[in-house]
Image (spheres, rainbow, N blue to C red):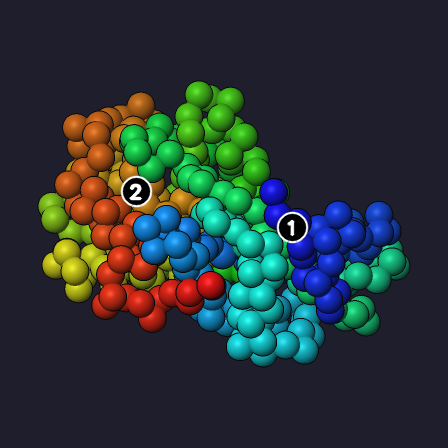
Amino acid sequence: MAQRYAYFEGKFVPIEEANINIQTNSFHYGTAVFEGIRAYWNEEKQQLFGLFFKEHYERMLANCKILNFQVNKTVDELVDITVELLRKCEHKENVYIRPIVYFPNLQISPKLIGYDTELAIYTVPLGDYLDTKKGLKVITSSFHRINDSMIPARCKVAGAYVNSAFAKTEAIRAGADEAIMLNPDGTVAEGSAENLFIIRNGVAITTPSYSNILEGITRNAIIKLLKEELDVPVEVRPMLRSELYIADEAFFTGTGAQVAPIAEIDGRVIGNGEIGEITSKLQDLYFNIVKGNVSKYSDWLIPIY
């Protein structure tokens, strides 16, 4: 097995050496911004394809502004570092990439000023985060989604994922695979760590950015594919909980989730309880694209080797 490396505080080091002090400020207060990025291995082509590297780093740097991080790297520099890291690790499997920006200072005080900024990036082999081969059993969580006046959901702030952890744990304890989170006004937000789509009468519906969702990069790609490749109209609008129960199809999207079909919500069977026709076509198209098999979308990808 090849040696794994991390990019840690300005240099490449063996993963075992990429460690923070227990006194690190962001460890205590959750004041870190991270991204989740994927790269897909194509065995036939013997090539690893990085997916949406530029878009993820653009979002990360935008989110860093919200937390007042001062990252002295451009998007292109971050992409180059990530490509080099993957090459050093010699990955020949599907990979998850985790960049994280944090305050390395050892002082105790929850604030967003007066501290330094550091960056770390590491990789880990990863298959499916959610089962994409069968419909998921889902519940609506009793925990509301955080809103923009608390912790902005559009920002991948480490501490915000306590909210997600409550919902996910509640779902698992209830015998479900995942949770859907509502806003305090009862409208639908998203999954615990995924964007959400439903299909009704041949129309795809997904919740807008002001419904306290992560502005998903995969979500944007799926909207494009639905409209331009599958000829499915897309409505981006607020959604009510009862709409979930009468959906013909439903699925999660995200870097981790990919395109993950939903078979049941709160005990109600969605469609016929199987992967829906549109969801199935979307899955096939998406997985072909990310493995470099659709030349039309080659600009979504960066060949690593």
Residue 243, located in which quarter of the rendered image? top left
The type of residue carrying mark 1 is Arg
Q: Mark 2 points at which residue?
A: 251
> Image quadrant for the N terminus?
top right
Residue at figure coordinates x 84%, y 48% from the top left: 22
| Label 1, residues with CA under 10 Å away: few <14, some 14-19, many ≥20 | some
Check the image and report above or below for 135 versus 115: above
Q: Residue 239 carries which label?
A: none
Look at the image and tell me whether residue 195 can be seen: no
For label 1, the SS is loop
Residue at 71 percent across and 51 percent down: it is 15
Left/right of residue 52 with respect to residue 298 in the rendered view? right
Front residue of 152 and 64: 64
169 or 217: nearer the viewer: 217
- Viewer-nearest residue: 195 or 10: 10
Q: Position of residue 143 (x, y in %)?
A: 51, 37
Q: Mark 1 points at which residue?
A: 4
Q: Horizontal and vertical percent for residue 236? A: 27, 59
Residue 171 visible (yes or no) = yes
Neighbours of disc 2 within 10 Å: few (<14), some (14-19), many (20+): many
Mark toward the viewer: 2 or 1:
1
Chain-order first, disc 2 or disc 1: 1
Q: Are marks 2 and 1 in contact (CB under 8 Å)?
A: no
In the image, taking residue 4 as reference, residue 216 lies left or right, namely left
Q: Which amino acid does label 2 sit on?
A: Phe
Residue at x 46% of width, y 47% of height: 93
Q: How many numbered marks are there?
A: 2
In the rendering, at what x and y percent does residue 162 appear?
61, 42
Q: Position of residue 277 (x, y in %)?
A: 15, 41
Secondary structure under the numbered disc 2 in the rendered image: strand
Q: Which residue is drawn at 75% across and 47% down?
A: 16
